Each structure stands twice: as C-alpha cells, then as structure tokens.
C-alpha cells in the first residue's frame, strides 16, 4: 500500500505538468485552480501518508521500479526511497509549493507569461519530487537535471530583458559544475561497489566500512566530488555569487526555489549520502571549516546589500553554511530542523519583501536615526573598513569564478578559433571515418595503443565542444560541433574495451535525431530572418515561439537531458571507462558539461533577450 502511494505522489506532478500544457493561455483561473488544487491534493495525500508511516514505526521504504537498461555487469533502474529525510523535504516542498501557487495566482495576474510560469512550476515540482524520493544517484540525477533547466527558465522568465537572461545562463553554468562532480561520483561509485548502489544499501555501515577500508583514496575522492556538487547547488563558497543573480526572476519563484527548496538540495545530497561521508573524517573537517567560512563571509556581504532580495539571498547562504557544519559534526536531525526553519523564514521574507521595503522607506523618511554602535567596534578601524569594502565587492567571488572556470574555457575555445565549417567536412569527418576503420583492427592493438587512441579521440571531442562554446558568428557550425563531440566520445570509449555496439547506438540515437531537427529549425529561422549570429541576444522568441520551443527540446536532447535514450547512454558510456583512467574520464565529463553550456548559450543568444528588430519595445536591463 505504501509503495502505491509513493507512485501516486510521483505521478501527480507528471499529470499536472502534462495537463497544464493544454490549458489555453487566456484561461488564468483554470490554470491557477488546476495547479493549486492538484498540489493541494498532493499535500493532503502526503500528510496522510506521513501520518500512517509514523504510526507504523517510520520504517525505511525502498521501491525498486523500472529497469531502463540492463546488460552484463551494468543496470540502470529507477529506485525510490522514503525515510525521515525524504519525509521532511517532501512535506516542506509540498506545503511551500501550495503556498506559492496560491500567492502567484494574484501576484502574476495579467502577466503575459502567466501560463509559462505555472508550466515551469509543475516542471520544477516534478524534478524536486524525483530528487527527494530518489533511491539511488541515477534517479537523483534525473531530478537534479530537471531542477537545473527549470531554474534557468524561471530566472529568464522576463525573457525580453537583458540581465535576467544573462544571469540565467550564469546560474546554469554554475549548476553544470555541480553536474561534473555528480557524474564523476557516480562513475567511481560503480567501480567501488560494482553495481548501481542504492541509498537503502548505503545505510549498511558494515558494508560501507568494508569497501572504504580497501579503497581509502577512492572513497575520499567520491566524498569530495559529492561535496563539490552540493556546494554548487547550495551556493556555498566559492560559488556563492550565483544566488543573488537568480533573484532576477519573479518574486514567487525567488521565494520557493532560491530561498527555500532548490538552494537546499545540496544539503539533501549530503544528508542522503551521510552514511558514506561518516567514514571520511578529513572531508567532514573540510566541510565544517568551509561552512563556517561561508557563513562568516555571506553574513558580512548580506549586511551591506542595497537590494532586499540580495540581502535575503546572502543571509540564506550563511544559514546553509551553518547547516553544512552541523552535518559535518554528525548532527543530522538538527540539520533537518534547521533546513525547515530556514526554508520557511526565507520564503516568508521574500514574499513580504516588497511591502517591508515600502514600509522601511516611509519609516526612514519620517523617523531616521543614525546607528551609533556596531557589533564590530572591538576590532581595529582599519580591519572594519577593509571588511566593509570587501563585503561591498562581495569578496570578488564573481571574478574568482570567472577566472577559475569560464576564462579557461573561453581561452581554450579561442585557441581553436581557426576551425571553420570546411574543417568539419574536410578533416573531422574523415578523422571519424578513420577511427571507425581502426576499430576493425581493435583486437590486434596493444593495450597502451588502444588507451592512447581513446584519449586522443576524447580530446578531439573536447576541442570541438570548446570551439562551439567560443563561437560567435556561425550558429550552425556551433550546433554541429556539439553533435560531432558526441560522435568522438563514442569512438573514444569504443577503443577502451570490448562491448556490444548497441550501447553506442543507444547513446547516439537521441543525439542524431536532435541534431538533425535542430539543424532544420536553425535553417528555417535563418531563411526567414536572414541573419543569425551569437554576438548578442536577438530575442527571436517574440515572433517564433514554436521554433524556440522546438530548438530548446532538441538542445536538451543533444545534451543528454532525461528525455531521450542518450541520458541512459551517457551513464552507460561511463561504465566502460576504467577506475584508473582519470584523463579519459575527465575529458568525457568536461565534454558533457561544456556541450550543455554551449547549447544553452546558443538558445539564449538566438531566442532570448531584447529583440534585434527595433520596432519591438526595448525592455529595461533588469527586472
């Protein structure tokens, strides 16, 4: 009975999202009533189910569901798990989502993106439920990816404006860093356990301790990779600067996603994998120290912010830093309680922030009193002033992220700026055909030769996707470079070990179809508009909504989003990379991440932002 209710709770967001797509845009009442009505039903079912679960001794429930793919030594299946962590996150998420949908009904009244907002809320709710009910890392990663793209769509809700779109791309790029950590952690988990390990098995401390003892280094690396993913998702140092930029979206989305639910998903990842982290003392010490440092820096930045949304964002980051410290100390129950308090507080603060700002302005105008005492009076004045200036500059976290991550990618792309469309036809396609020919002699190749060949083709794929990321003129060239990157990755892994070529077919099936349809959409748009480029935002979604939607779906498919078999294929490809092949694994994982960035950059530059035609209204740069 409990397993059936878990299925019902997971199917409600799918039903809500699918039905919301067919509700006409002019029917605001129908859309809002359908949304908060079904989410209300979901909340009631969840409350009854949780009460029943508590009365029966709150057992851990593991539901192993659909087997998506199975072969020798590899299984990809959906698994769902319900325990106290899931219960807390699901209840908080269900209540706050219901609250926000009721609030948004009036807040967004007559907004031209009204339907689009509720569609995206349903999409987000689907990703959130999949993540918090997940029973293994693969299922969690599906929800993780859905949350990433729904966050991009919500931040860029005011898609005719410059800054919301730019900040949406910036936030999505930080999320992709978290994806690298999770992909590599899943890869090493497969080699550590020799199976698709579930969270139900992970709570077996004897089993975990036995594997950690014989693989100390691998265990520490997995813990660090999970920590990087959690820090990127929860805006901890050095990734803290993205959260205030995410506030460019509507206030309801800021309240529920970046104030309460999405920003705490990194905490959820740490709580869910805590039985594994418990044996990684050095990683836990590092997590505790970083949590304290993040709390200190974020608190000081919050105190000097001129925007109320930014102030709340940094205050939330500070509290999440404290939560990470609590987890590092083993206070899991306190961390769960702290999550609830922080989520409800930040949601409330963001929802009432417009009214509070109005009140404070009026209060200052009539009753202004200068502050005479500071909490930092005990420090020397020079230190206080330095801290103030550094807080004003947000400790240069934005520049740090740019120089650490995006500047190397852009420089790498510019190094290969000589690659043009003719080079694809005259060099890279023949190189791929040569690789396919060499596969015929794979059995005669020595191990070192095959390993070097794998790394070579993986590096070629990485070169192509870096070039696509830096391309500014030719949209079709950037698109096909992303597609050919997948071909070279498949070729690289084919030289690594013997396996059935149906794995490669599964991986490339979604990529090929998406690449052809995306190319067709670009050709149609170019034929109608005359000029397409990537120098700046062009806003063609104004006049070509269906082109924009079709291209976005193709872009998600070509990036391995969980809507095509390529998503399973990517994980399957990684299963053929050996534990000691770090160079190959790094090349492949970075290629997967950068192709997502390149895709979202193409979509944003072509379809979002201020329209290139001057007869359309030019929006303000910020919301």
Image: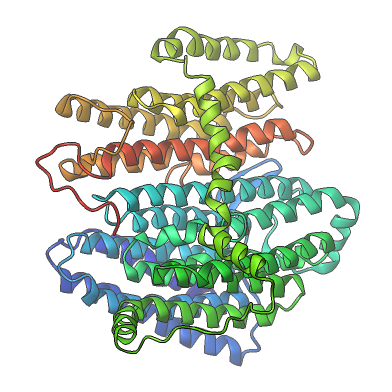
* Residue 360 x, y percent position in the rendering: 34, 83
Q: Locate residue 89: give its quadrant.
A: bottom right
In this picture, is 262 found above or below 545? below
Q: Nearer the viewer, residue 104 or 552?
A: 104
In this picture, is 424 found above or below 174? above
* Residue 299 x, y percent position in the rendering: 58, 71
110 relative to 272 in the view: left or right: left
Q: Name the residue located 60 percent from the left edge and 81 percent from the top edge.
A: 338
> Is residue 319 something that shows in the picture?
yes
Q: Nearer the viewer, residue 382 or 219?
A: 382
Residue at the outermost left position:
615
Residue at the outermost top position:
426
277 relative to 586 in the view: left or right: right
Residue at the outermost bottom position:
55
Q: Name the residue located 58 percent from the left edge and 21 percent from the top edge.
A: 460
* Residue 285 x, y percent position in the rendering: 80, 65
């Amino acid at each position: 009975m409990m397993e059936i209710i878990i299925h019902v709770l997971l199917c409600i967001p799918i039903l809500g999202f699918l039905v919301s797509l067919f509700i006409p845009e002019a029917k605001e009442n129908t859309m809002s009533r359908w949304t908060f009505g079904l989410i209300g039903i979901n909340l009631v079912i969840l409350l009854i189910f949780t009460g029943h679960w508590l009365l029966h001794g709150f057992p851990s429930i593991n539901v192993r569901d659909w087997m998506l793919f199975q072969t020798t030594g590899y299984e990809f299946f959906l698994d769902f798990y319900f325990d106290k962590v899931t219960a807390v996150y699901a209840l908080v998420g269900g209540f706050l989502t219901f609250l926000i949908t009721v609030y948004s009904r009036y807040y967004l009244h007559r907004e031209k993106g009204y339907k689009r907002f509720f569609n995206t809320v349903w999409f987000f709710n689907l990703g959130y439920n999949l993540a918090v009910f997940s029973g293994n890392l693969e299922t969690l990663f599906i929800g993780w990816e859905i949350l990433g793209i729904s966050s991009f769509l919500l931040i860029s809700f005011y898609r005719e404006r410059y800054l919301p779109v730019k900040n949406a791309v910036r936030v999505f790029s930080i999320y992709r860093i978290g994806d690298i950590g999770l992909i590599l952690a899943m890869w090493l988990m497969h080699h550590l356990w020799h199976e698709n390990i579930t969270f139900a098995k992970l709570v077996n401390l004897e089993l975990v301790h036995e594997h950690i003892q014989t693989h100390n280094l691998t265990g520490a690396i997995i813990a660090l990779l999970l920590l990087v993913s959690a820090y990127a998702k929860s805006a901890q140092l050095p990734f803290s600067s993205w959260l205030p930029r995410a506030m460019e979206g509507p206030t309801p989305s800021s309240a529920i996603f970046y104030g309460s639910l999405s920003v705490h998903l990194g905490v959820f990842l740490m709580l869910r994998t805590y039985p594994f982290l418990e044996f990684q003392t050095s990683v836990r010490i590092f997590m505790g120290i970083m949590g304290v440092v993040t709390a200190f820096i974020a608190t000081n930045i919050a105190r000097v912010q001129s925007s109320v949304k930014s102030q709340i964002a940094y205050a939330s980051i500070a509290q999440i830093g404290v939560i990470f410290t609590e987890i590092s100390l083993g206070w899991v129950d306190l961390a769960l309680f702290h999550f609830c308090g922080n989520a409800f507080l930040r949601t409330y603060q963001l929802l009432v922030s417009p009214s509070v700002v109005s009140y404070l302005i009026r209060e200052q105008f009539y009753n202004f009193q200068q502050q005479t005492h500071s909490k930092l009076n005990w420090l020397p004045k020079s230190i206080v002033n330095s801290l103030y200036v550094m807080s004003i500059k947000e400790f240069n976290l934005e520049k740090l992220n740019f120089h650490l991550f995006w500047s190397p990618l852009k420089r790498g792309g510019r190094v290969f700026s000589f690659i043009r469309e003719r080079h694809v036809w005259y060099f890279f396609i023949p190189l791929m055909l040569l690789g396919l020919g060499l596969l015929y002699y794979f059995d005669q190749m020595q191990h070192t030769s095959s390993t070097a060949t794998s790394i070579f083709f993986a590096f070629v794929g990485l070169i192509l996707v870096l070039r696509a990321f830096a391309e500014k003129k030719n949209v079709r060239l950037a698109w096909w470079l992303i597609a050919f990157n997948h071909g070279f990755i498949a070729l690289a892994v084919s030289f690594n070990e013997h396996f059935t070529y149906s794995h490669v077919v599964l991986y490339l099936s979604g990529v090929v179809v998406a690449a052809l349809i995306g190319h067709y959409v670009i050709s149609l748009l170019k034929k109608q508009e005359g000029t397409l480029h990537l120098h700046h935002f062009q806003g063609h979604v104004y006049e070509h909504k269906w082109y924009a939607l079709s291209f976005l779906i193709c872009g998600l498919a070509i990036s391995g989003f969980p809507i095509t078999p390529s998503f399973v294929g990517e994980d399957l490809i990684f299963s053929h990379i050996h534990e000691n092949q770090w160079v190959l694994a790094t090349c492949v994982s970075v290629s997967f991440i950068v192709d997502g960035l390149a895709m979202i950059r193409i979509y944003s530059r072509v379809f979002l932002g201020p329209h290139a035609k001057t007869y359309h209204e030019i929006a303000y740069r910020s919301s």
